[in-house]
Image (cartoon, rainbow, N blue to C red):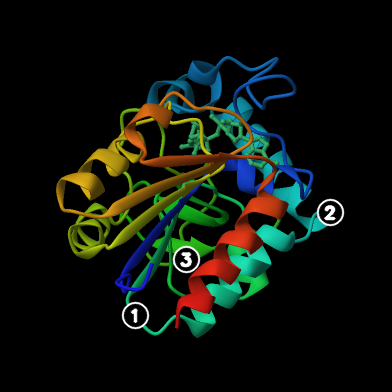
Amino acid sequence: MASIRNLVLLTGAGLSAESGLATFRGPGGLWEGHRVEDVCTPEALARDPALVHRFYDLRRAALDNVAPNAAHEALARLDASWPGELLIVTQNVDDLHERAGARRLLHMHGELRSALCAACGTRNRHEGALPPASPCPACGAAALRPDIVFFGEMPYGMDRIEAALAEADLFVSIGTSGAVYPAAGFVQMAAHFGAATLELNLERSAGSHWFEESRLGPATQLVPQCVDGLLAQG
Ligand code: OAD
């Protein structure tokens, strides 16, 4: 621990589960009743924009009824206090990291409270429902869509993420199934560049064998413990 200076923390749906937001896979997962290809691809958006927009409208509305949990709060505390480089890379499209106070944060799969203009590429803060063909405040085109990275699209911030992984001394993966690339491959990239690798998850994931250490349990217990350990090293 003493030689750890640069951190990359990857978070997934399991981090927000104890705030009351359903995960994607497993019992109660978000895809139940909705095939992923019906709501999370460019083809689905072109075929049935009303369904796709409605799906994300409901998820955006659900944010009003949830709050950050002890795991989000611990990561925000780490962000505020950690003297070295730190990047929280989240696959989550909720805003619970920032509501807990995290600053060094990258939403690689987009954000529910953002709208993307399919015509000019501008990203705009957005609250409330987003009907199909809403006008873009920047260019006026009737082309706003949910600012979500669909399957087959390039995640945000890959250059910044890869640079942070190359410099990382420790890579921590929290509450993610390791089922979706490129995020699922970050552990191998970090290890390739010499980082120690740690997984914190409720159960063993598809990528557990890539990690030097896996700690199993709920994020609200494991993450504060891990953060306390990291901050105690200084
Ligand atoms: P998943 O739903 O695939 O995985 C969630 C993981 O969290 C599972 O391994 C659970 O065991 C674990 N988990 C559940 N509750 C937990 C808890 N209380 N504490 C710790 N771990 C817990 O979610 P992601 O891996 O985030 O993409 O899914 C990756 C991407 O798939 C998402 O970002 C989404 C989806 O397609 C987009 O929206 C673009």
Query: Mark 3–mark 1 contact, CB under 8 Å?
Result: no
- Per the image, the residue denoted by label 2 is 65
Residue 42 in sight in this render: yes
Q: Residues within 10 Å of mark 3 (few under 14, many from 20)?
A: few
Task: Identify the mark nearer the N-term, 3 or 2.
Answer: 2
- Nearest to viewer (mark 1 / mark 2): 1
Is disc 1 in contact with disc 2, using a CB cutoff of under 8 Å? Answer: no
Q: Report if residue 95 is visible in the image.
A: no
- The residue that disc 3 covers is 137
**Mark 3 → mark 2, Cα distance in angstroms:** 28 Å
Q: Given the image, on which type of amino acid does mark 2 rest?
A: Asn
Q: Earlier in the sequence, mark 3 or mark 1?
A: 1
Q: Position of residue 130 (x, y in %)?
A: 62, 48
| Quadrant into which the N terminus falls | bottom left
Question: Are the two marked residues, 3 and 2, in contact with CB atoms closer than 8 angstroms?
Answer: no
User: How far is disc 1 from disc 2 in space, using C-alphas?
Assistant: 34 Å
**Mark 1 Cα-neighbour bin, 10 Å: few <14, some 14–19, many ≥20:** few
Q: Is the residue marked 3 within 8 Å of ligand 1, measured from its CB?
A: no
Ligand 1 image-quadrant field:
top right
Give the side of residue 172 with respect to residue 196, left or right.
Answer: right
Q: Residue drawn at (79%, 57%), measured in percent from left and top?
A: 64
Please state which of residues 145 and 33 is positioned toward the viewer in this rendering. 33
Give the image location of residue 103, x and y in percent. Answer: 49, 76
List the residue tagged with mark 1.
84
Q: CA distance from mark 3 to mark 1?
A: 38 Å
